[in-house]
Image (spheres, rainbow, N blue to C red):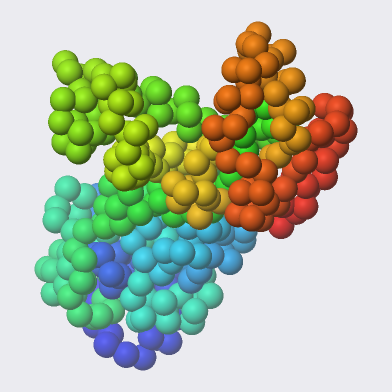
Amino acid sequence: METKIFTEKLSEAAKLIAAGELVAVPTETVYGLAGNGLDAAAVEKIYEVKGRPEVKPVSLMVPGAAAMTKYCEAVPKQAKYLAEKFWPGPLTIVLRAKDTVPEIVRAGGETVALRCPDHPMTLELLKKAKLPLAAPSANPSGAESPKTARQVMDYFDGKIAAVIDGGRCGIGTESTIIDMSSAPYKILRRGALSEESIRSALAERLTVIGITGGTGCGKTTALRLLEKKGAMIIDCDALYHEMLETNAEMLGEIDRVFPGSVTDGKLDRKSLGAVVFSNEAALEDLNAVTHHYIGLEVQRLLEDWAMQGGALAAIDAIALIESGLGERCRAVIGVIADKTTRIERIMKRDGISCEYAMMRVNAQYPNEYFEANCKYILRNDGSEKDFEKECNKLFKEVLKNG
């Protein structure tokens, strides 16, 4: 067989694909060995030419995210979002396959891997062929993945129908593979696209609601209702106290800013409090440190939740606005109540005196602060049942666009 080299006239290459032949194609990572992904006989040729074990499935190259629902079932919104963000590009997404995908492509399994290559010639071929391309790397199994058409010819001259010479591949590293056929999502192969980029992108897609307000206002009730709707709840106050025991980096930074405030890995709260609570500038310095590290930990938790397949999260923080966490939220909701009502609730809840409850309420922001800085306000001066109705009404409005 004479192996043709194409630098243009991709219509002829498309005809070869449709006829069941194999054509090596360029991508932004490495060259791929492509055949009609819906033709079991063509895919069989790929296995034979590469010497690839048939227990290993092959991926399908597609022209864009729209192909997901054409060849896959139960495609999660998160997969569509990653495709829209990173395709064309070095990301392969594994999903549940429809029966139209040949069993040999799936290696007998129930999933198929899709990839949209970032190379103009291969994208043009996909459009002309109007077929998905089964396309593992264009090398004998175990050999180095080729980055040039010349390397492909060295491997397969006379064994395949053609090579599309698209120049040297720019990245030279295989695509990253993520399995999104079920949750939690799993990185199966680390490649050209970083795992951090994927995690961050999925977290960006989360619907995050911020809940803030003073003690005794009813934040716990609002958060409980969000949890019933499937939200992960991040309690920043609890998170901060946990980090004081576990986050050596944060403690080290506190000790750098306030020398002697950390001893044997433990924060001396009394000595630190003596400094910051009598000095506004010092308190601002402490908040700058803690807000930074809490922000990093919140981001990690959101990314973990997104990789679990989560779609909704809520952040509970008294300092939601000034910490900058509110900017991460789709909606910032301030929960407020009359001062007298709050004092009565705190006394009953915590078993404390009226004077102590009043002192705690007076030490926090007034209702006007939340009214001025929050997009939405939930007032909770009545019964818990009435407040729950107001919460659900507002949450429905905030979440209606998903």
Residue 106 place in picture, x, y as percent: 47, 46
Residue 354 place in picture, x, y as percent: 67, 16
Residue drawn where x is 28% and y is 31% of the image: 275
Q: Quadrant of the N terminus?
A: bottom left
Q: Is residue 316 visible?
A: no
Residue drawn where x is 43% and y is 87% of the image: 11
Give the total number of marks visible in the rendering: 0
Task: Judge left or right: residue 385 versus residue 181.
Answer: right
Relative to 328, say whether 159 is above or below. below
Task: Judge left or right: residue 339 versus residue 360.
Answer: right
Residue 100 place in picture, x, y as percent: 60, 54
Task: Judge left or right: residue 219 versus residue 111.
Answer: right
Residue drawn where x is 41% and y is 51% of the image: 200
Relative to 350, say whether 210 is above or below. below
- In this view of the protein, which residue sits in the foreground, 69 or 355? 355
> Outermost residue, bottom direction?
9
* Quarter assignment of residue 218: top right
Q: Is residue 68 visible?
A: yes
Residue 212 place in picture, x, y as percent: 60, 40
Relative to 194, say whether 296 is above or below. above
* Quarter assignment of residue 166: bottom left
Residue drawn where x is 26% and y is 57% of the image: 192
> Outermost residue, top direction?
351
- In this view of the protein, which residue sits in the foreground, 295 or 147? 295
